[in-house]
Amino acid sequence: MRKAALRLAILAAAAPSAGCGDSWPKICQNELALHHEFNDALMKIVDEDSAKFYKEFYFEKMKTTWETLQKRKEMYVKSRLDNKQILDDFVREMVADSQQRGLKNPLLMKQDVLNRWANDEQRKNQINRLKNIMDLVEEFSYHVKPLYVSEIGAVIERRRRQLARINGLIEGLQREGKEAPNLEKVRSAPGTIFSGAALL
């Protein structure tokens, strides 16, 4: 438990440091690290007592760290882009095109999308307002790169297994006529801690 506390403290200390040396991949990796930390905590919960301990001493800190990361993300986007929606549209088109062609890496389609946008007057005006668009696409496409997507999938599967195990603990206690308030709060913790996250 002490090792987990130390890792969380280090991550929490790093979270507010938006600015010099920051990047979109680094922020994504910090988010992913917090999801891993949460999964590590789930693995250590075996009964009501351990559920109470992690709920009281870890999950609230994780929630605060997540909220700080979201503020950091917002600040970083504002520092790099006037309109992230344009870039999100570009990335979505890369992903759609790569899926149509059976490609695992959406970035392989960036030149195709850029060429298509260059022939669309509205899109052409939008990309003309973005300086270094290819650098921005490369950076802000980090979350759709195959390695990152694969790691996200592993986190989701690991969490699914642990929440299923915790659900089994709750059902076992209920069959014995006992209540499991702390375990039930742990079961719903992902939505409470990672507010607004696609990965729950």
Image (cartoon, rainbow, N blue to C red):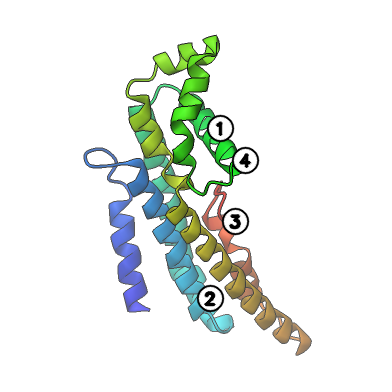
Question: Circle 4 sits on which residue?
Answer: 100
Q: Residues at badges 4 and 3 in contact (C-beta under 8 Å)? A: no
Q: Is 134 left or right of 67, judged from the image as shown?
A: left
With respect to residue 115, does 54 lie above or below? below
Q: Amino acid at mark 4?
A: Gln
Q: Amino acid at mark 1?
A: Glu
Q: Mark 2 to mark 3: distance in Å?
A: 17 Å
Residue annotated with mark 2:
52
Q: Which residue is mark 1?
A: 93
Which is more N-terminal, label 2 or label 1? 2
At a point 62% along the width and 40% down the height, the residue shown is 100
The extreme bottom residue here reads: 176
Please tell me whether mark 4 sits on a helix, a strand or a loop. Answer: helix
Q: Is residue 107 visible from the viewing direction of this image?
A: yes
The residue mark sitting in front, 2 or 4, is 4
- What residue does disc 3 label? 191
Q: Residue at x 36, y 46 (%)?
A: 25
Measure the alpha-carbon separation of dots 4 and 3. Answer: 32 Å
Quadrant the N terminus occupies? bottom left
Tag 3's secondary structure? Answer: helix
Q: Is residue 140 above or below residue 153?
A: above
> Seen in the image, is 199 located left or right of residue 169?
left
| CA gap, disc 4 and disc 1 | 11 Å
Residue closer to the observer: 107 or 13: 107
Q: Residue at 33% across / 31% down in the picture?
A: 135
Q: Is residue 28 left or right of residue 113?
A: left
